[in-house]
């Protein structure tokens, strides 16, 4: 079973890969990572999870779930760019993609039978392209109540 420290190490490595993708291609491909732990290290299978509509999104989630079950995954990790906005009193409730005050972030979600983790890091854009700014924010479910909807359907795949 993966320890919290090993999961954080995997997330940090995916963060470095994502930063390279931003610098090289000016974007982070939406990607799933299926992690299998063994005595000599980790096997990580990478799954393209890019989608352009809700049907494709559902299909990719199911594909990730089936692969996690088939490979008897110890963890499933998901990385993508996303829009984030902050709810404030008096502000109209809207999707972050429609909010003029939105911020672009790198989001990495990870689930194991024991842990759920969310990493957020802001993405800035200037004339030289996109780049990560500030320090990444780690939120562990056992430390802070967070919602990980995208991976909630995949969770049973890594519990057994």
Image (cartoon, grey):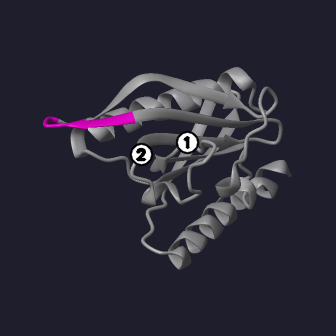
Circle 2 packing at 10 Å, graded few (<14), some (14-19), many (20+), is few
Q: In this rendered view, identify the residue nearer to me: 109 or 84.
A: 84
Location of mark 2 (residue): 101
> Which x, y percent locates residue 106?
45, 40
Distance between the alpha carbons at the discs numbered 1 and 2: 8 Å
The residues colored magenta run: 123-128
Report whether residue 23 is seen: yes
The answer to whether residue 111 is left or right of residue 118 is right
Q: Quadrant of the N terminus?
A: top right
Contact? badges 1 and 2 (CB < 8 Å)? yes
Return the x and y of residue 36 as percentages of the image width and height. Answer: 67, 42
Compared to residue 112, the image places residue 58 above or below, namely below
In the rendered structure, which disc, 1 or 2, sits on the residue that comes first in sequence?
1
Classify mark 1: residues with Cα within 10 Å, few (<14), some (14-19) or many (20+).
few
Residue tagged by mark 1? 86
Along the viewing direction, whichever of 41 and 132 lies nearer the viewer: 132
Q: Is residue 117 left or right of residue 18?
A: right
Residue 126 location, quadrant:
top left
Helix, strand or loop: magenta stretch: strand
Residue at horizontal 45 percent and vertical 54 percent from the top: 99
């Amino acid at each position: 079973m993966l320890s919290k420290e090993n999961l954080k190490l995997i997330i940090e490595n995916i963060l470095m890969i994502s930063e390279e993708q931003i610098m090289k291609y000016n974007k982070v491909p939406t990607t799933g990572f299926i992690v299998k732990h063994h005595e000599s290290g980790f096997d990580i299978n990478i799954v393209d999870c890019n989608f352009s509509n809700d049907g494709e999104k559902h299909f990719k989630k199911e594909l990730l779930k089936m692969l996690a079950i088939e490979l008897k995954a110890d963890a499933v990790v998901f990385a993508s760019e996303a829009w984030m906005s902050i709810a404030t009193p008096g502000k109209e409730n809207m999707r972050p993609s429609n909010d003029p005050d939105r911020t672009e972030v790198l989001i990495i979600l990870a689930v194991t039978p024991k842990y759920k983790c969310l990493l957020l890091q802001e993405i800035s854009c200037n004339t030289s392209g996109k780049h990560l700014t500030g320090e990444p924010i780690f939120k562990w479910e056992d430390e802070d109540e967070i919602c990980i909807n995208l991976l909630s359907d995949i969770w049973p795949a890594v519990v057994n």
